[in-house]
């Protein structure tokens, strides 16, 4: 780092631990020079995407659920402390 200023974006995930909010995950990245603004997704499209995931879950077939995730998708399970960081882990 040379001390120069850059435009960046930041994401934080917090957990409440020992009576304090603490960062459990942090990501920062430089802003791209030119941002392409895709067309906004509609509420109906969001519902449809959720139904695809929920339908895969209802089959009780882990491969069908895993197939809904991106190649480098991350699943933070509800009932497990183990992040699933690849396809095999999600399956």
Image: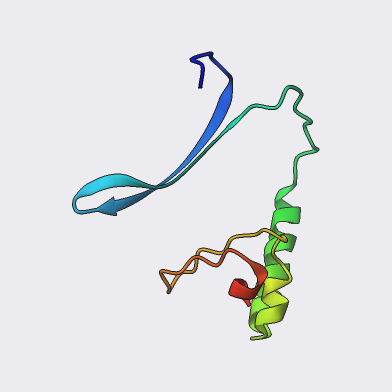
* Location of residue 42 with respect to 89 vertically, above or below: above
At x 51%, y 22%, the residue is 1
Does residue 7 sit above or below 63 in this rendering?
Answer: above
* Residue at x-position 49% and y-position 69%: 77
The type of colouring in the image is rainbow
Q: Position of residue 62 (x, y in %)?
A: 65, 81
- Residue 9, quarter of picture: top right
Residue extending farthest to the bottom is 60
- Left or right of 67? Residue 3 is left
Question: What residue is shown at x 43% (from left), y 73% (from top)?
Answer: 80
Looking at this view, name the residue that lies furthest to the front. 2
Q: Nearer the viewer, residue 81 or 88?
A: 88
User: Does 91 sit above or below residue 82?
Assistant: below
Q: Position of residue 74 (x, y in %)?
A: 59, 60
Quadrant assignment for the C terminus = bottom right
Q: What's the residue at 28%, 52% (across, down)?
A: 16
Along the line of sight, the residue nearer the viewer: 59 or 26: 26
- Residue reaching furthest to the left: 19
């Amino acid at each position: 780092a040379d001390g120069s200023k850059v435009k960046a974006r930041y994401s934080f995930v917090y957990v409440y631990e020992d009576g304090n909010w603490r960062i459990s995950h942090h990501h920062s990245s430089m802003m791209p020079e030119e941002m392409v603004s895709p067309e906004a997704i509609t509420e109906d499209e969001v519902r449809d995407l959720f139904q695809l995931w929920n339908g895969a879950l209802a089959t009780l077939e882990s491969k069908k659920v895993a197939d809904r995730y991106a190649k480098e998708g991350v699943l933070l399970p509800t009932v497990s402390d183990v992040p699933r960081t690849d396809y095999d882990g999600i399956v």
